[in-house]
Amino acid sequence: MVSLLSLTYYSLISVVAYLCIFTLGGTITFRVYKNIMQAVQKTSDGHPFKDLLEVDLTLPEEKVTEMSQSLVQYMNASLTTLRSLFLVEDLIDSIKFFVLLWVLTYVGACFNGLTLIIIGVVLLFSLPKVYENNKAQIDIYVKMAMDKLSIITHRYVSKLNVKGTELIREI
């Protein structure tokens, strides 16, 4: 959360550099402290991070291949969906996408991306508890909203179908 808040005031490069400086400062301080303690106590414990230095950090090739294949599948599915939305394969879905983008322009005018991420992180950890405490009431309102949305969607679909048949008759 501190990293997200600092990103709202500083650039990504500055935040990453400060986090690395903070981490490196801590490890250097710990190493110097351990060396001083070894000199004072006359022990030969060795490097304090020896176990961590011996950990194998290489990525297995088969895992990388598997992950890249699933990433390619995800990207292809996303591109296919975007193509169908932008080229109006289904008119209703494209209109819904248009409305979503239009709403996002207003959201973007009010908040920057980092503010939305911070709000998302806070909601991610608080909404499950709110839902758990008020499940019955929330389910009632969600059902009411879904019913209203389906009524509005059916109304617009029927209007579009009527206008489409009138246009065909004129031709």
Image: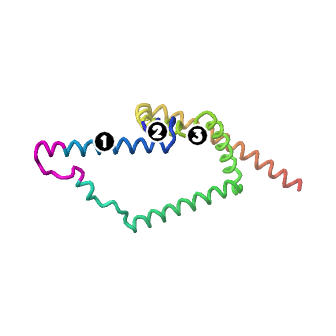
Query: Visible in this render: residue 154?
Result: yes
Q: Nearer the viewer, mark 2 or mark 1?
A: 1
The answer to whether 146 appears left or right of 23 in the picture is right
Mark 3 residue type = Met
Tell me if residue 116 comes above or below residue 170 in the rendering: above
Residues packed near mark 2 inside 10 Å, few (<14), some (14 to 19) or many (20 plus): some
Residue 135 x/y as whole percent? 44, 34
Mark 1 residue type = Gly
- Using the numbered discs, state the Cα–Cα distance from disc 2 to disc 3 in whole angstroms: 34 Å
In the picture of the structure, the residue carrying the numbered disc 1 is: 26
Q: Nearer the viewer, residue 125 or 161?
A: 125
In the picture, residue 24 is in which quadrant?
top left
Which contiguous range is marked in magenta? 36-49
SS of the residue under disc 3: helix
Mark 2 residue type = Leu
- Using the numbered discs, state the Cα–Cα distance from disc 1 to disc 3 in whole angstroms: 52 Å
Q: Nearer the viewer, residue 44 or 89?
A: 44
In the picture, residue 149 is in which quadrant?
top right
Q: Nearer the viewer, residue 165 or 121?
A: 121
Tell me if residue 23 comes above or below residue 168 in the rendering: above
Quadrant that contains the N terminus: top left
Q: Residue furthest right?
A: 170
SS of the residue under disc 1: helix
Q: Nearer the viewer, mark 2 or mark 3?
A: 2
Checking the image for residue 146, the label placed there is 3
- Using the numbered discs, state the Cα–Cα distance from disc 2 to disc 1 in whole angstroms: 21 Å
In the picture of the structure, the residue carrying the numbered disc 2 is: 4
Query: What residue appears at the point 37 percent right and 66 percent down from the top-left corner?
Result: 60
Residue 25 x/y as whole percent? 33, 42
Tell me if residue 143 comes above or below residue 53 in the rendering: above
Residues packed near mark 1 inside 10 Å, few (<14), some (14 to 19) or many (20 plus): few
